[in-house]
Amino acid sequence: MHETSQPIELLLSVHRDGAGTLGGQIEEHLRGAIRDGALHAGARVPSTRDLAHQLGVSRRVVVDAYAQLAAEGYLTLRQGARPHVAEGAAAVAGAVEAAAPAPERPPRFDFRPSVPDVSTFPRAAWLRSYRSVLGEVADAELGYGDPRGVDALRATLAEYLGRVRGVVADPARVVVTSGFTQALGIICHALAGTGARRLALEDPGDPEAQLIARRAGLEPVPVPVDEHGIVVSELARADADLVILTPAHQHPTGVVLSGERRNALLAWVRERDALVIEDDYDAEYRYDRAAVGALQGLEPDRVVYAGTASKTLAPALRLGWLVVPSRLVDTVRTQKALADRGTARVEQHAFDDFLRRGELDRHLRRMRVRYRARRDAVVEALATALPDATVRGIAAGLHATVELPRGHDAAAVREEAASRRILVETIDEYRHVPAGGPPTLLLGYAKLPEPAIHAGIAELADAVRAAAAR
């Protein structure tokens, strides 16, 4: 019997003084593994030659054991092919497997917010940077290194953030993270360790922030948001030690923190000796004018700045960053080390090269044009299909906040749309405290070309009317 020569391993041992013959022990182990589900139908097993070598037994012992298992229906043996678990093995063994669930049909129109168009990821440019790094990176850079991140990337990020967002940063204060979720968890744990008790958060806002705060031992305190941003007078009543904000483009309402509110917020921070966590998640995408500068630039010793590549490039990169006040550097560094010893360093070197080549700047210029056209398509389609709806918030980001006339039920609209394979979200899904505001949908447009946007909103309008009729 000819068998493929590429070796694979199998967790199996035999004992010459054990119960039964060596061949019988092999048979018993493999039967048990197949019955228990450790070896599934179609799973490859070592060739007789490889397994005999691994176990230190005669090949004839393994040949005879495999032949017996094949006769019983556990293994399939074919000349020139790798032995594998028979497709009917589970039935022969009497195992009952739950039927695999039918795969969900993909949505016809996916309007879920905060998702970039990953099909535009600049693969060729990223591959050039990755290949360059693999060919040039020093051996020492393949170790754990500083948990804060690769020195070169931290220096490049400090320069980039100062240039495009007005962030006051030096490389020592930059910490590279595995995305924003980890960044927020690190900051919350670090501040809880210094005595912080309460975290104020925007309402509506990111639902995960509450979970992350509680996991770190902080008490989350929702603070309302209106058309000017977070209500600072309510923030003062929250008795919070820190607050997390999205000031450049509030998520999900789409408003920008007004200048008056910024000044009031900073006055509260100084008076309270509190800290701000600034989530600058998509400020690069402003379409009607230049984006406002980062809040951190006004108070760098009291604002923790957080950014990410998830909205600008792709969530799969798992790259984020923090710029922290000097007094928190050591504490945050310790928390980052405890979290994962540091974000993947080869990817960090690639991102550094990508940034220094200007590839991110080029990508953002292309995507601003594309996303603006898609947002315009949303506004135009709504004006035709749902003329009573109102788009709220600034022209920015990856989603539009769409307010329906009172009397509609946003949850019912979402349910009706889902039945038509149209995915949308509502602002109520982002509220920490139930509120009686107008029914509001969140329509992400980044992934959809303009023709699909027009068609999708026309069908969404039908769902809105059907939900109202119900």
Image: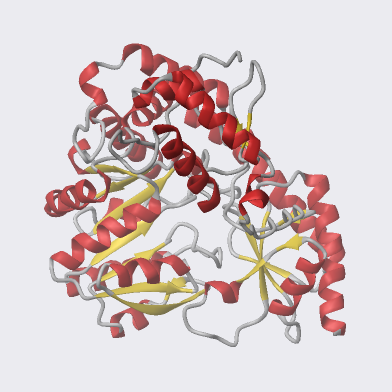
Instruction: Locate residue 225, reporting x and y percent.
Output: 47, 75
Instruction: Locate residue 130, reporting x and y percent.
Output: 43, 21
State the residue in front, 70 or 384: 70
State left or right for residue 385 relative to residue 95: right
State the residue in front, 394 or 199: 199
Residue 107 seen = yes
Q: Residue 89 lies in what quarter of the image? A: top right
Instruction: Locate residue 1, reporting x and y percent.
Output: 61, 15
Question: Looking at the image, is 53 positioned above or below residue 27?
Answer: above
Tally the numbered discs: 0
Residue 284 seen = no
Residue at 48% in and 17% down = 128
Instruction: Locate residue 158, reporting x and y percent.
Output: 29, 37
* On-image quarter of the C terminus: bottom right
Q: Residue 272 lies in what quarter of the image? A: bottom left
Question: Looking at the image, is 313 positioned above or below residue 346?
Answer: below
State the residue in front, 430 or 346: 346
Residue at 63% in and 56% down = 94
Question: Looking at the image, is 276 positioned above or below residue 72?
Answer: below
State left or right for residue 374 relative to residue 133: right
